[in-house]
Amino acid sequence: MPFFSFRPRFCLPTSLLVVFSLLLLPALRADNITADIDAANRAYTYGSYDEAAKLFRGIIAAQGYSAPLYFDLANAEARAGHPGQAMLNYERARYLAPTDADIDHNLQLARKQAGLEPNSYRWWQVMLRSINWTFWFVLIIVSLTLLLLALIASNWAKVFAQGLNMPEARLRKICKGVFFIFIPLSLVFAFVEVAVIGFGNRIEGVIVAPKEGTLRLSPFDSAEKIGTIPEGELVTVEDRHNDYLRVEARDHHFGWIQQKEIEPVVAGSFDVPPTN
């Protein structure tokens, strides 16, 4: 039985149509997103805040997240009377753009309206959020390399001084200067590196349960209730057991709260293996 291979052949008009389609798709997608943003902004302007929030959520789902989109969504949620969702999206916007003054201003205003204490970033928190840990790691490597070279040059000062055609005393003085400057600098860089990694790895969430979330002594529905956390409050997540999360509240009290009552600032950050 003969074997036939199928080879599609495109005529010139069809090929051009395919090429033009591929070129036009990104432009059409961008036009659709722009139209959706315009529709969301119109809904917000005319007071349809729930509709605006719905449209902004759809844009984020289709286009991907960004600080401006989270900011617009948070504004719509705040106007719609959803403090938990408003604070969550302000926090997400602030996480992506920690130096943005408008985001911080609206976040603190929303917190005030919800009866929550302000939680603006301090200058060092802005710095830790803004810098990349790899930058400080490179600085540490450079500092340690200079210290190693200075140590070698100090131990072999006579040989290096002859090779560099300089007095041995001057070379030793340079080595001492390197030690004096870069030993403390290396310690500072290492401290900042640890702080950046620790601050960046902190898992945060916002209470989205209506009115308040229930804090329990242990991760079970039958456990004793030890307090509540108001809707919209930012907490740090320390541990997880089944569908409960152990959180640190603003007053430094710890307790367990159901995961459905809290949303992560960084999507997916709660997806860690549960404890036994």
Image (tube, rainbow, N blue to C red):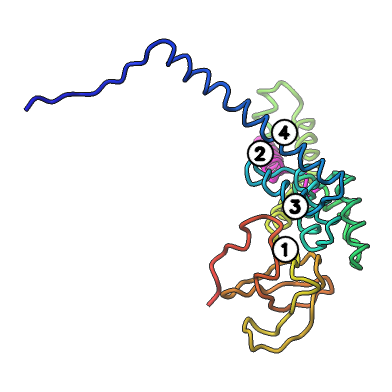
Assess whether mark 1 and mark 4 are in contact (beta carbons under 8 angstroms). Answer: no
Q: Does the magenta portion include 150?
A: yes
Q: Find numbered disc 4 in the image and state the secondary structure of the residue it sits on.
A: helix
Q: Amino acid at mark 1?
A: Gly
- Residue closest to the eye, 194 or 2: 2
Mark 1 and mark 3 lie on one chain; the one further toward the N terminus is: 3
Q: Amino acid at mark 2?
A: Thr
Assess whether mark 2 and mark 3 are in contact (beta carbons under 8 angstroms). Answer: no
Q: Where does residue 89 sit, x and y in percent of width and height?
A: 76, 54
Can residue 62 be seen here? The reply is yes
Q: Which mark is residue 34?
A: 4
Cα gap from disc 3 to disc 2, whole angstroms: 38 Å
Mark 2 and mark 4 lie on one chain; the one further toward the N terminus is: 4
Assess whether mark 4 and mark 3 are in contact (beta carbons under 8 angstroms). Answer: no
For the N terminus, which image quadrant?
A: top left
Which residue lies under the disc numbered 3?
92
Q: Where does residue 12 sit, x and y in percent of width and height?
A: 41, 10
Q: Nearer the viewer, mark 3 or mark 4?
A: 4
Q: Where does residue 123 sit, x and y in percent of width and height?
A: 88, 50
Which residue lies under the disc numbered 1?
205
Q: Find numbered disc 3 in the image and state the secondary structure of the residue it sits on.
A: helix
Residue, x 75% and y 75% (percent of image)? 213
Q: Amino acid at mark 4?
A: Thr
Mark 3 Cα-neighbour bin, 10 Å: few <14, some 14–19, many ≥20 = many
Q: Where does residue 115 sit, x and y in percent of width and height?
A: 92, 68
- In this view, the residue farthest toward the left is 1
Q: Which residues are magenta?
A: 127-156
